[in-house]
Image (tube, grey):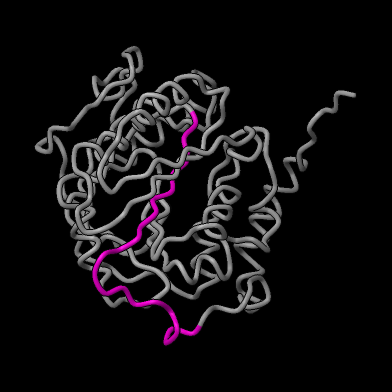
Amino acid sequence: MMTTKTYAPRWYNTYAIHFFRLIMTRIFPASWFREALPEKSIRKAVDGFVNLEIVSHCWGYSNMLTYQLSSFVNYPPKKSALTVTVFYAKEDVKTQAVLDFFSEKAVDNVSWNFQALTKGQLFRRGIGRNMAARSTKADWLWFTDCDIIFHENCLDSLAEQLQGKQESLYYPRQERTTEMLTQDDPMLRQDSEPQLVDIDADGFSLHSRDKAKGAFQIVHGDVARAIGYCEKLKMFQTEDDRWRKTYEDTAFKWLISSEGIPLEIDGVFQIRHIQKGRYTKDSNVSRVRSKIRRLQE
C-alpha cells in the first residue's frame, strides 16, 4: 500500500524554533539537550597526519558544488586524509550529474562520500549533519555549505593549525568572497556539462570572521561523535517539505557553549549569490529576499 509522507505542520517548526531561540536558551541549561561532552583532557590531540571530514548539503546549487568539488581535485591535501561528504536528493538531477562526474575522479588522500537523502531529510540540514557527526571516523569535521571553495593550501594549512588542538569548535579567521552575484553571472551558469573548474582569485575580496557561523564550523571528532548535531532538539531533526532558513548552527554553538576559536587558514573562498535555493525561483518571496540581499550588499 502506498503511503503519503507527512511532515510537521509549518507552524510547529516556525514557532518551536523561535521559542527555542528566544526563550529556551535563556532559561534551560544546554546540558539538558545533549549527551555529556567528553572532557577536553581526554579528546584526541592530533600529532601529524590529520583525518578530516568535510560535510556539505546541496539542493539546486550544482553550479557552486562544482567549484567546491573541483577545489579538492585541483588542490588535494598532502597533510590530511579527507572524506568529502555531500548530502543531496536524487530528484536534483543536475547535482546527481555533478556527483556522478566527480565520483569517477581518483584523487590522492581524498575519498568521496555522496549520500542521497529524501527531500524531506535534506531540507532540514540538522538531520544530515547529525548523521555525519554520529558516524564519522575523522579527527575533525568541517560543517560547510556547497558555496565554499577550499583553494590552494587551505587543507594543508588547516591540518597544521589543528595540530595538538582539543577545543570543541574552531573557524577560519578570514575568508575571501565574491560580490553578491546575480543568476546571470558567468560563475553561476547552469547550462554546462559537469566539468573541472577553478576560480580567478583576484575576483574575491578579503573579509574577517568573528564566530563559527553556518558554513564555518570545524568540530572536534570526539565531540561530534558524543553528542551528534542538535540530536535532541526535535525541531532540527524533523523533516520538512522545503528548504528552511537554518538556525541549527546557532543551536549547536549553544549546546557546546562556544562561539568557536579562530584559526589562520589559507585559501577559504565563498561564492556569494543573491538568489537563495530555499526559495522558489521567481516567486514573490524570492524576489523580496533578493532585493533585501542587494540592499544588504
Please determine whether, in this image, residue 102 is positioned above or below residue 236: above
Q: Is residue 165 left or right of residue 156?
A: right
x then y, percent, for residue 134: 57, 60
Residue drawn at x 42%, y 53% is 143
Please give the count of numbered marks on the rendered protein: 0
Residue ranking furthest to the top: 191
x then y, percent, for residue 194: 33, 20
Of 77 and 165, nearer the camera is 77
Q: Is residue 54 magenta?
A: yes
Please determine whether, in this image, residue 279 is positioned above or below residue 123: above
Query: Can you tell which quarter of the image residue 266 is in?
Result: bottom left
Part of the protein shown in magenta: 39-59
Of 197 and 239, nearer the camera is 197
Q: Is residue 44 left or right of residue 233?
A: left
Query: Can you tell which quarter of the image residue 53 is in?
Result: bottom left
Residue drawn at x 53%, y 70% is 254
x then y, percent, for residue 99: 42, 29
Q: Quadrant of the N terminus?
A: top right
Q: Quadrant of the C terminus?
A: top left
Residue drawn at x 20%, y 47% is 176
Query: Can you tell which quarter of the image residue 220 is in?
Result: bottom left
Residue ranking furthest to the right: 1
Q: Is residue 262 left or right of residue 92?
A: left
Q: Is residue 148 magenta?
A: no
